[in-house]
Image (cartoon, rainbow, N blue to C red):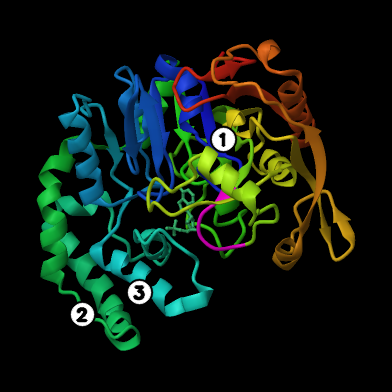
Amino acid sequence: MPAIVLVGAQWGDEGKGKATDLMGPDVDYVVKFNGGNNAGHTIVIDGEKYALHLLPSGILTPTCTPVIGNGVVIDLEVLFREIDGLEARGVSTDKLVVSANAHIIAPYNRTLDRVTERFLGSRKIGTTGRGIGPTYADKMSRNGIRVQDLFDHHILEQKVEAALALKNQILTKIYNRRAISVTEVMDELLPYAARLAPMVADTTRVLERALDEGKNVLLEAGQATLLDVDHGTYPYVTSSSATAGGACTGSGIPPTRITRVIAILKAYTTRVGEGPFPTELFDADGEFLRTTGFEFGTTTGRPRRCGWLDTVIGRYATRINGVTDFVITKLDVLTGLDTVPICVAYDVDGVRHDEMPVNQSDFHHAKPVYEELAGWSEDLSDIRRFEDLPAAAQAYVLRVEELIGARVSAIGVGPGREQIISRHPLLD
Ligand code: IMP
């Protein structure tokens, strides 16, 4: 004990690395339990910038064992590119453990993700085009390729053949693309087998042992609450379980071992891809948040859609994840505004909604009800104690805490690892 879950409270890109950094060397294992290289986190250590898409953030902490859990989908080329990139910069990746049950993103699934989006036109999801959705779809339809399949040539061939029998029909007959051969797929996947083999394990046993030994295990979600396939803004979601429940299925750690759920909430809201976003700004304020917060995707480089903080979403995240602690990130980005609006409820066709509407069409039509808080102009980047924040910034945090219904344990005031105000320890 303990196992701690870390999730994003909004639509992703909240800066989960901040919380991981805060726990730093006290975390013994960091487990990625969902998603794949659709995620992206930028970590700045001693002025050096590391952009990771697939590897768990714990890879940068020498005392930490990074684990890719069974709930993850792996693009092998990306995995080894990231490993090689880190090794070239002197970061050891020797401790990485990969679940034998994780699914592999086969080349045809990358192709299918892109051509499907193109085919959907204005009805597209706005995916990252990395093959994530089709790979999870294969997992659920029971024709996916798992890490363990790589080590038996015959089984791999059978599985690829079975998958392609269907995929090639779709590719050639619906999308008018060329068929993909079994050999092509085998030639792409097999060369990675020998390098991958020593990393592969039954990660559920590795993690059980770690917890029995009293190690700190951090389960780090990719994406975020509103991108969760069950609880997010469906269909504009990713295809995996990005909420606290997914931490259990995606890692094999049972719910009874989870002691804390930490959610990361950006001081404003961003979203990439399509889908409803009640507090989205299309004016100079939106541009201010985008440029000041440097809101451009780590994975795709797309400019992120920006808007004010939405505490209806924050409350929803508390409910769905059982959040015990929030970390507010990027508070410094709000510096310089005369007033800071916070969305406290929605107006849907004249009816006030204090909670997330269950009906997606209500959410599509939701107009934010704002409360205007006083702004501040002081630079926050060197502040390390809550009491030293300008009174208006303190009032902002306390009001947010009240509205989202769980304590705010830490506040990010800049991109650097050390630019954080701690109010309550995240590990105890
Ligand atoms: P997919 O995960 O590539 O299938 O994309 C589905 C939706 O999730 C799209 O709107 C993506 O932009 C969004 N998405 C996926 N990963 C992330 C992430 O790490 N941050 C923010 N949005 C993401």
Residue at the spot 27% in from the left edge and 52% down from the top edge: 75
The nearer-to-camera label among 1 and 2 is: 2
Amino acid type, mark 1: Pro
Q: Is residue 121 left or right of residue 312?
A: left
Q: Against 25, is 234 above or below?
A: below
SS type, badge 3: helix
**Amino acid type at image mark 3:** Val
Q: Which residue is mark 1?
A: 255
For label 2, the SS is loop
Q: Position of residue 364 (x, y in %)?
A: 70, 64
Q: Is residue 359 above or below residue 341?
A: below
Query: Is residue 125 covered in magenta?
Result: no
Above or below, 179 relative to 79: below
What amino acid is labelled 2 in the image?
Ala
Q: Label 2, on which residue? A: 179
Residue 115's mark? 3
The residue at 29%/69% (across/down) is 111
- Asked whether residue 216 appears in the rendered view, the answer is no
Q: Which residues are magenta?
A: 270-275
